[in-house]
Image (cartoon, helix red, strand yellow):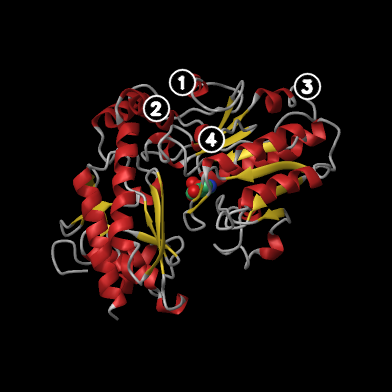
């Protein structure tokens, strides 16, 4: 880090903080950005340098940082109550949020189980899918069908559903087995999964899929029209459909939910990341009436769902999520996603795709990936290109040798230009050796 008022913060951090997905022996060498505040779509570090947040703080920020209406929602809620438990009791702002979400989620007769992280929302969904079969007298149906390159979080259950990578192999002995469909890189992935549902229905409880985009797996994309057959097979064979929209939800792919474009109405829907506009940790598992009803019964009794997180349904998070949902609906932000997505796709096609150092570009809404034609993983092109972009004031983080471009939904045309220009310059620098 450059000398200046902020000198020393990275060293203080390294002395006491353990960063996720980071080799701490190399942390300081990688010139970490030490953020002290943010304005709009820019993060500001301890030396006053500004960085365009082109990964939306790991895909959670939707409208930007320091949004006046969202700040106000948190402040107003602070004057009422910050948190009260949802186990057996309610909190009115959570009720209001669930009512507002119920009107827009692609789920029939929805009920919301709130948690704090995407992984927890997935964990709740998989336990519900297991428990439902016990309640319905078919405990043998407990296998999940999931996709290679899928990513559902880092807890052991979520890691079991996920494909290889992200430490999945290392934790292999702790993971439970699943039926595995191909990744979205295979054009027949959805057709194969659909056939597997019919073939294995007797043992399957649920299919878990990221609609349209496998995000962390490398921004792999499948066409919207490929998904309807999978949904129909699940319905025909009474296999639950779990849509993991932790990454794709809340406008990221151009519609409020990717399931809307994919023609899917899941039995269980996982939400996280953008739910609070990126302000506070909150996630939710949305259960259809068909799932919810299967858990009604005697009290005490074996049908009760024995699961709950201390901070599930936190009132501050609910207040900001409620205001955020209103803003998504009342402002033109989804139209901006469509326009900026088209601009980004065109610029990448013109300026990046023709380069020998680029293998493929993929764009859906404001989820995009530029797959590099790197000489090999040891060359660490993904990380070096992102480091070169950060030095030019655009914050990027790679997925292996795929550069993920995930700007806030309010990104401007000038900022899209800047992201592509900086990426092209950073790539030229690294490719030149
Ligand atoms: C990020 C992500 C998760 C995990 O969410 P966390 O909040 O990081 O636990 C799950 N599923 C998908 C599709 C994600 O992108």
Numbered badge on residue 325: 2
Numbered badge on residue 368: none
Mark 2 to mark 3: distance in Å? Answer: 33 Å
Element under label 2?
Answer: helix
Q: Residue at x 17, y 69 (%)?
A: 2
**Callout in the foreground (4, 2):** 4
Q: Is residue 370 visible?
A: yes
Q: Residues within 10 Å of mark 1 (few under 14, many from 20)?
A: some
Mark 1 to mark 3: distance in Å? Answer: 27 Å
Q: Earlier in the sequence, mark 4 or mark 3?
A: 4
Q: Earlier in the sequence, mark 1 or mark 4?
A: 1
User: Disc 2 beta carbon < 8 A from ligand 1?
Assistant: no
**Callout in the foreground (1, 4):** 4
> Mark 4 = which residue?
259
Mark 1 to mark 2: distance in Å? Answer: 8 Å
Direction from residue 386 to residue 114 in the image, left or right: right
Residue in the foreground of this view, choosing between 8 and 355 = 355
CB-based contact (under 8 Å), mark 4 and mark 3: no
Direction from residue 110 to residue 322 in the image, left or right: left
Q: Earlier in the sequence, mark 1 or mark 3?
A: 1
> Mark 3 = which residue?
297
Element under label 4?
Answer: helix
Mark 4 to mark 3: distance in Å? Answer: 31 Å
Q: Position of residue 245 (x, y in %)?
A: 52, 40
> Mark 1 = which residue?
100
Q: Position of residue 265 (x, y in %)?
A: 60, 30
CB-based contact (under 8 Å), mark 1 and mark 2: yes
Element under label 1?
Answer: helix
């Amino acid at each position: 880090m450059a000398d200046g008022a902020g000198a020393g913060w990275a060293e203080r951090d390294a002395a006491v903080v353990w960063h996720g997905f980071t080799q701490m022996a190399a942390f300081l060498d990688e010139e970490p950005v030490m953020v002290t505040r943010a304005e709009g779509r820019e993060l500001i570090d301890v030396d006053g340098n500004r960085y365009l947040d082109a990964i939306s703080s790991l895909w959670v920020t939707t409208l930007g940082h320091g949004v006046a209406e969202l700040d106000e929602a948190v402040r107003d809620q602070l004057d009422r109550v910050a948190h009260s438990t949802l186990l057996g009791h309610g909190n009115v702002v959570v009720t209001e949020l669930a009512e507002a979400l119920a009107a827009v989620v692609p789920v029939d007769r929805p009920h919301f189980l709130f948690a704090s992280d995407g992984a927890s929302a997935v964990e709740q969904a998989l336990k519900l899918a297991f428990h439902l079969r016990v309640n319905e007298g078919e405990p043998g149906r407990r296998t999940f069908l999931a996709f290679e390159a899928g990513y559902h979080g880092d807890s052991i259950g979520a890691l079991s559903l996920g494909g290889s990578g992200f430490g999945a192999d290392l934790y292999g002995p702790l993971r439970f087995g699943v039926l595995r469909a191909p990744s979205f890189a295979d054009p027949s992935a959805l057709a194969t999964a659909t056939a597997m549902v019919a073939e294995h229905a007797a043992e399957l409880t649920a299919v878990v899929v990221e609609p349209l985009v496998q995000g962390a797996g490398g921004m792999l994309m499948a066409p919207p029209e490929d998904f309807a057959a999978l949904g129909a097979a699940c319905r025909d064979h009474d296999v639950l459909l779990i849509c993991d929209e932790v990454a794709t939800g809340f406008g990221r792919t151009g519609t409020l939910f990717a399931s809307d474009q994919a023609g899917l109405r899941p039995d269980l829907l996982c939400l996280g990341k953008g739910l609070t506009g990126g302000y506070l940790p909150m996630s939710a598992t949305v259960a259809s009436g068909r799932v919810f009803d299967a858990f009604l019964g005697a009290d005490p009794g074996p049908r009760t769902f024995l699961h709950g997180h201390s901070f599930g349904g936190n009132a501050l998070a609910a207040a900001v999520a409620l205001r955020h949902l209103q803003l998504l609906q009342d402002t033109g932000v989804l139209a901006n996603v469509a326009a900026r997505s088209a601009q980004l796709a065109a610029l990448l096609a013109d300026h990046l795709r023709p380069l020998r150092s680029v293998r493929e570009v993929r764009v859906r809404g404001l989820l995009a990936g530029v797959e590099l034609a790197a000489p090999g993983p040891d060359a660490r092109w993904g990380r070096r290109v992102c480091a070169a972009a950060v030095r030019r004031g655009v914050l990027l983080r790679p997925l292996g040798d795929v550069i993920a471009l995930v700007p806030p939904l309010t990104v401007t045309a000038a900022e899209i230009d800047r992201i592509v220009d900086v990426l092209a310059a950073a790539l030229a620098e690294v490719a030149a050796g």
